[in-house]
Amino acid sequence: MQKTVAAPGSNHMMKIADSREARGIIRTGEYTGHTAGIAPDFVQGNLCILPREAAQEFAAFCQRNPKPCPVIGMGSPGDPALPDLGHIDIRTDIPRYRVFKDGQLVDEPTDIRKYWSDDLVTFIIGCSFSFELPMLQEGIHLQHVARNTTVPMYRTSIDCVPAGRFKGKMVVSMRPLSPADAIRAVQITSRFPAVHGAPVHLGLPEAIGITDIMRPDFGDPPEVSAGQLPVFWGCGVTPQVAIEAARPSICITHKPGSMLITDKKNSALAAL
């Protein structure tokens, strides 16, 4: 892949093939944009950091809702490293974070060193970016990758299974596809249950509580052409919504679209 590094302060996508190199640039704070298409061979993950006293309930919530919340990594209390996923410092290695206190967004920093404490536990949730590479390799056009935008994400009317204080509705990501590509996408993504797996819904957005597909709750508005179907996957923003409602004393997540790039290969997650 052609190597292109974003200029300091730029949010334009950098075309970097190597995960460690991409994280190194992110760590400097020079890149604060979305990570779709960056180091595409490598697994990306959604971030949730919680106090130790909430971690057990949150782990149960993820276990009960594997489609939107597949856990692919978990840190030890107070340890910012994630050795199973690579040479990672979770305090610096995501382009943009979101910090919540008592359920209220208080900051969107490029590193969280000043918020870190020995009480915090890191969870990494599988991301649908991991199944996009095999879709692209099959010739499926992914609009947000081609347009260099963030995939649109929506709050739905689909209930998650609660666990203690954590509960709420599922958030989904959407990709507009031709009927033929939609069928092939179901086949491809079914092989990746660790990163959301097959779609949860096709067509008829109003059937899952989405009233205006052109106004996503997160990400950028799509362009849905005549003959295309909106195809919806469970999204790793779901646990963020549940955490906001639970209002823990502190919670740190990623800005939607700005993921953790790990050293694990996407191919390692394929079930078949």
Image (cartoon, rainbow, N blue to C red):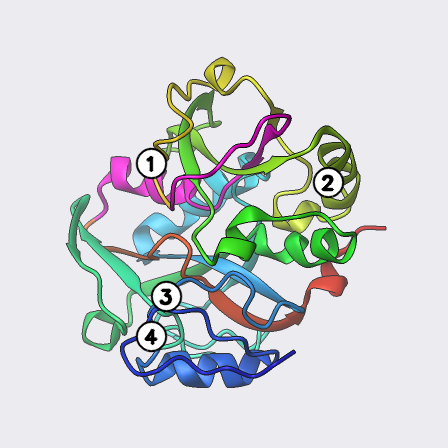
Residue 182 on image: x %, y %: 71, 34
Secondary structure of the residue carrying numbered label 1: loop
- Relative to 65, is 220 on the left or the right? left
Q: Which mark is residue 33?
A: 3
Residue linked to disc 2:
185
Magenta residue span: 220-248
Q: Is residue 247 covered in magenta?
A: yes
Amino acid type, label 1: Asp
Q: Quadrant of residue 187?
A: top right
Vertically, is 6 above or below 104? below
What label sits on residue 217 in the rendered view?
A: 1
Query: What is the secondary structure assignment of the residue under circle 4?
Result: loop
State how many labels appear.
Answer: 4
Residue designated by label 4: 91
Which one is earlier in the sequence, the residue at label 4 or at label 2? 4
Which of 174/126 is in front?
Answer: 174
For image coordinates 27% across by 77% down, the residue present is: 9
Name the foreground residue: 68 vs 246.
68
Residue 232 appears in view? yes
Local crowd size for mark 1, using a 10 Å CA cut-off: few (<14), some (14–19), many (≥20): some
Question: Which residue sits at x=59%, y=72%?
Answer: 39
Q: Secondary structure at mark 3?
A: loop
**Kind of residue at badge 2:** Ala
CA distance for labels 4 and 3: 17 Å
Residue 126 in sight in this render: no
